[in-house]
Image (spheres, grey):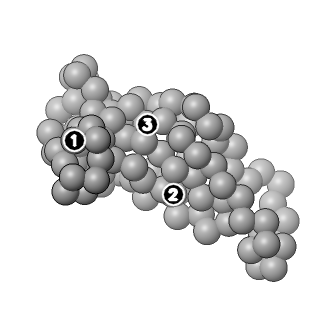
Amino acid sequence: MKKVRITVVKKTCHTELMEKYERPLENPCDMQEGQTFTANGWQRPEGLCLSAWESMSAFVMALSYGAEDIYNGWMKNKRSAMISCNDGFRPVSFLLETMDEDAQ
């Protein structure tokens, strides 16, 4: 089993949807573009949003166990995947990459 690097690639805000449907939040998503996390196998990295983890954990587990080409040729790196969290107001896109380092 390998470690998986999780990189915040893009954070988007759909303000028109937020204004129309969302109640104001004190602490919305605090992920920052360029921020990285390392998953030790299937374990959620400290500080990574639980909702985001629930969106990507199956992909992280697959990559950590050696899965490749998850999207049948879409990704340039066969040992990676692009995943977005399930927040419809401010979705965050994450790049998942299998590392050469073994998980502990």
Question: Disc 3, disc 2: CB below 8 Å?
Answer: no
Can you say which quadrant of the picture contains the C terminus? top left
Mark 2 highlights which residue?
A: 85
Please tell me the numbered disc located at residue 1.
none
How many marks do you count on the picture?
A: 3
Residue at image location 54% in from the left, 40% down from the top? 8
Neighbor class of circle 1 (other Cα within 10 Å; few <14, some 14-19, many 20+) is some
Which of pointers 3 and 1 indicates the residue nearer the eye?
1
Determine the secondary structure under disc 3.
Answer: strand
Q: Is residue 104 left or right of residue 93?
A: left
Q: Are marks 3 and 1 in contact (CB under 8 Å)?
A: no
Q: Mark 3 — residue? A: 6
Q: Is residue 19 above or below residue 39?
A: below
Residue 65's quadrant in the figure?
Answer: top left
The residue to which callout 1 is attached is 78
Instruction: Examine the image and state in which quarter residue 35 appears.
Output: top right
What residue is drawn where x is 19% and y is 48%? 69
Pinpoint residue 58: horizontal percent, then vertical percent.
Answer: 30, 54
Q: Is residue 6 above or below residue 29?
A: above
Q: State which tag comes first along the sequence, 3 or 1.
A: 3
Q: Are marks 1 and 2 in contact (CB under 8 Å)?
A: no
Helix, strand or loop at label 2? It is loop
Give the spatial CA distance, label 3 vs label 1.
15 Å
Residue at image point 25% right, 20% down:
101
Q: Nearer the viewer, residue 43 or 32?
A: 32
Three-letter code, disc 2: Cys
- Mark nearest the camera among 1 and 2 is 1
First along the sequence among labels 1 and 2: 1
Q: Residues within 10 Å of mark 2 (few under 14, many from 20)?
A: some
Image quadrant containing the N terminus: top left
